[in-house]
């Protein structure tokens, strides 16, 4: 598998998922948005463009590239010991990466310096498909470095990296989507994946709710580590999205999104 193929697959899945969720939000929304999408999407899509440029500049350090190098040079536990069952190894690798992302997310909430970066993700005053890919560039770089360490230690196969990265990106857009899913179906889906209603709780202005439902892909980490909250106290239609600070509309603009981590909260 070449890097070009990887980029094509990732972009194709991203685009298809983005279009599906965007259309779903138009015809069957979960909540009434407070702001016009054009107001928020300028900043959110701008951040995506900035992050894409940064990732292009550091492409030699991208996780998939390093996974290929590790495979070719037998670096990492799975590569050293030649795991016999490829499919099982891939599944275990994906679980390891997903746990790492969960732990990373918790740490970005618990450690003050990391929260300064991550809080930009939570300053969105509505929540929709673009919120799922609205992260500060420095946080993106740190996330890449963390995944690189995991890939090098365990010798994660490039196929596992590709599957995980594609699923993580698509899942983030899905569970941030402003889309309506019937309660019974949502309850069933929560047995396997993080749903929009489940993750939306995490974007509540109430701190006890913000510090819950950290998962992006599979829901089991929240269940196991007891960070799961079933529903927001005020219900999905009446809950307030965002933080108690940065509630002025100016903070939705691209240049403000980039500097929010360096602004002291008041």
Image: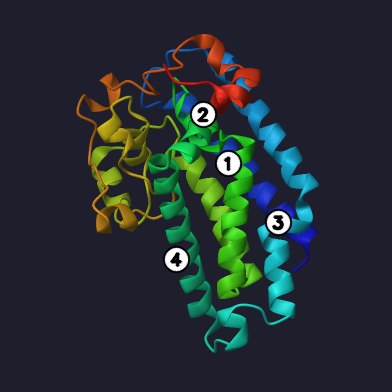
Identified at 69% across, 77% down, the residue is: 71
Q: Residue furthest left?
A: 233
Q: Position of residue 179 (x, y in %)?
A: 41, 32
Residue at mark 4 to residue at mark 1: CA–CA distance: 22 Å
Query: Residue 95's mark?
Result: 4
Residue at mark 3 to residue at mark 2: CA–CA distance: 23 Å
Q: Position of residue 102 (x, y in %)?
A: 42, 53
Q: Which residue is mark 1?
A: 139
Nearer the camera: disc 4 or disc 3: 3
Give above or below for 75 relative to 45: below
Q: Earlier in the sequence, mark 3 or mark 1?
A: 3
Check contact, mark 4 vs mark 1: CB within 8 A: no
Q: Residues within 10 Å of mark 3 (few under 14, many from 20)?
A: some
Q: Earlier in the sequence, mark 4 or mark 2?
A: 4
Residue at mark 4 to residue at mark 2: CA–CA distance: 27 Å
Q: Which residue is mark 2?
A: 120
Helix, strand or loop for disc 1: helix
Q: Position of residue 253 (x, y in %)?
A: 61, 16
Q: Nearer the viewer, residue 132 or 14?
A: 132
Nearer the camera: disc 4 or disc 1: 1
Q: Position of residue 192 (x, y in %)?
A: 35, 57
Check contact, mark 1 vs mark 2: CB within 8 A: yes
Q: Which residue is mark 3?
A: 62
The answer to whether residue 156 of the structure is visible from this angle is no
Q: Earlier in the sequence, mark 3 or mark 2?
A: 3
């Amino acid at each position: 598998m070449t890097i070009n193929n990887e980029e094509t697959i990732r972009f194709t899945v991203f685009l298809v998922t983005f279009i599906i969720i965007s259309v779903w939000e138009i015809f069957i929304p979960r909540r009434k948005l407070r702001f016009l999408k054009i107001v928020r999407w300028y900043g959110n899509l701008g951040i995506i463009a900035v992050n894409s440029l940064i990732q292009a500049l550091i492409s030699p350090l991208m996780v998939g590239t390093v996974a290929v190098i590790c495979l070719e040079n037998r670096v990492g536990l799975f590569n050293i010991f030649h795991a016999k069952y490829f499919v099982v190894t891939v599944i275990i690798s994906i679980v390891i990466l997903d746990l790492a992302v969960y732990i990373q997310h918790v740490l970005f909430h618990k450690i003050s310096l990391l929260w300064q970066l991550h809080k930009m993700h939570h300053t969105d005053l509505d929540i929709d498909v673009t919120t799922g890919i609205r992260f500060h560039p420095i946080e993106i770089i740190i996330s890449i470095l963390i995944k690189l360490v995991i890939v090098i230690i365990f010798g994660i196969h490039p196929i596992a990296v590709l599957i995980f990265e594609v699923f993580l990106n698509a899942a983030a857009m899905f569970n941030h989507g402003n889309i309506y899913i019937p309660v019974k179906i949502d309850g069933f889906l929560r047995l396997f994946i993080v749903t929009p209603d489940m993750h939306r709780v995490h974007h509540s202005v109430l701190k006890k709710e913000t510090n819950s439902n950290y998962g992006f892909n599979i829901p089991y980490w929240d269940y196991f580590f007891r960070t799961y909250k079933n529903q927001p106290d005020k219900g999905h239609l009446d809950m307030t999205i965002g933080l108690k600070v940065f509630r002025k509309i100016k903070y939705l603009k691209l240049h403000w999104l980039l500097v929010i981590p360096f602004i002291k909260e008041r």
